Image (tube, rainbow, N blue to C red):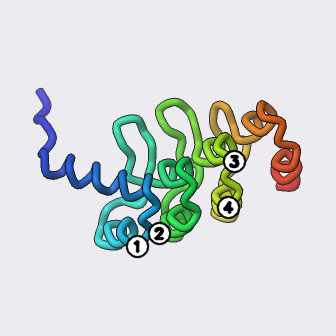
Amino acid sequence: MTEAPDPEVVELATRIFDLARQGRTEELVAYVDAGVPADLTNDRGDSLVMLAAYHGHAAAVRALLARGAAADRVNDRGQTPLAGAVFKGETAVIEALLAGGADPAQGTPSAVDTARMFGKADLLELFGAR
């Protein structure tokens, strides 16, 4: 039998995930700098980087990567932050993830597959150059 999670911990985690979604970089990294794992994930396996990337917050993505977050962490559905950024058309996030070492071939569908699906020849060319 497992214990129910502490409601205060759940509330704090929810607040931190919301900061990533909202791109509130300074507040987000203050928590990470205070000891919250840069690769913290929610109940669906979405990392802070995934949430920031999907919502178009390149500065938050860069700050998390600089603090050791993985650029390619796959969520429970096999998706990567890079594929999400391609899907959303977030160029600055794509550039930040690539600079942080993201692999366009990771995930299902991968960023390459996503770019193909949406006819993004410029991204396919960018990914091919890697």
The residue tagged with tag 2: helix, strand or loop? loop
**Dot 4, how many residues are within 10 Å of its Cα: few (below 14), some (14-19), or many (20+)?**
some
The residue tagged with tag 3: helix, strand or loop? loop
Query: Mark 2 against mark 4, which lies toward the viewer?
Result: 4
List x then y, in percent, for residue 12.
23, 55
* Mark closest to the chain's N terminus, 3 or 2: 2
What whole-number distance in Å separates the C-alpha atoms at marks 4 and 3?
Answer: 9 Å
* Mark closest to the chain's N terminus, 4 or 1: 1
Amino acid under disc 3: Gly
What whole-number distance in Å separates the C-alpha atoms at marks 4 and 1?
Answer: 18 Å
The residue tagged with tag 4: helix, strand or loop? helix
List x then y, in percent, for residue 43.
34, 37
* Mark closest to the chain's N terminus, 1 or 2: 1
List x then y, in percent, for residue 114.
72, 36
Location of mark 3 (residue):
89
Total number of numbered discs in the rendering: 4
Location of mark 2 (residue):
67
Location of mark 1 (residue):
26
Query: Mark 3 against mark 2, which lies toward the viewer?
Result: 3
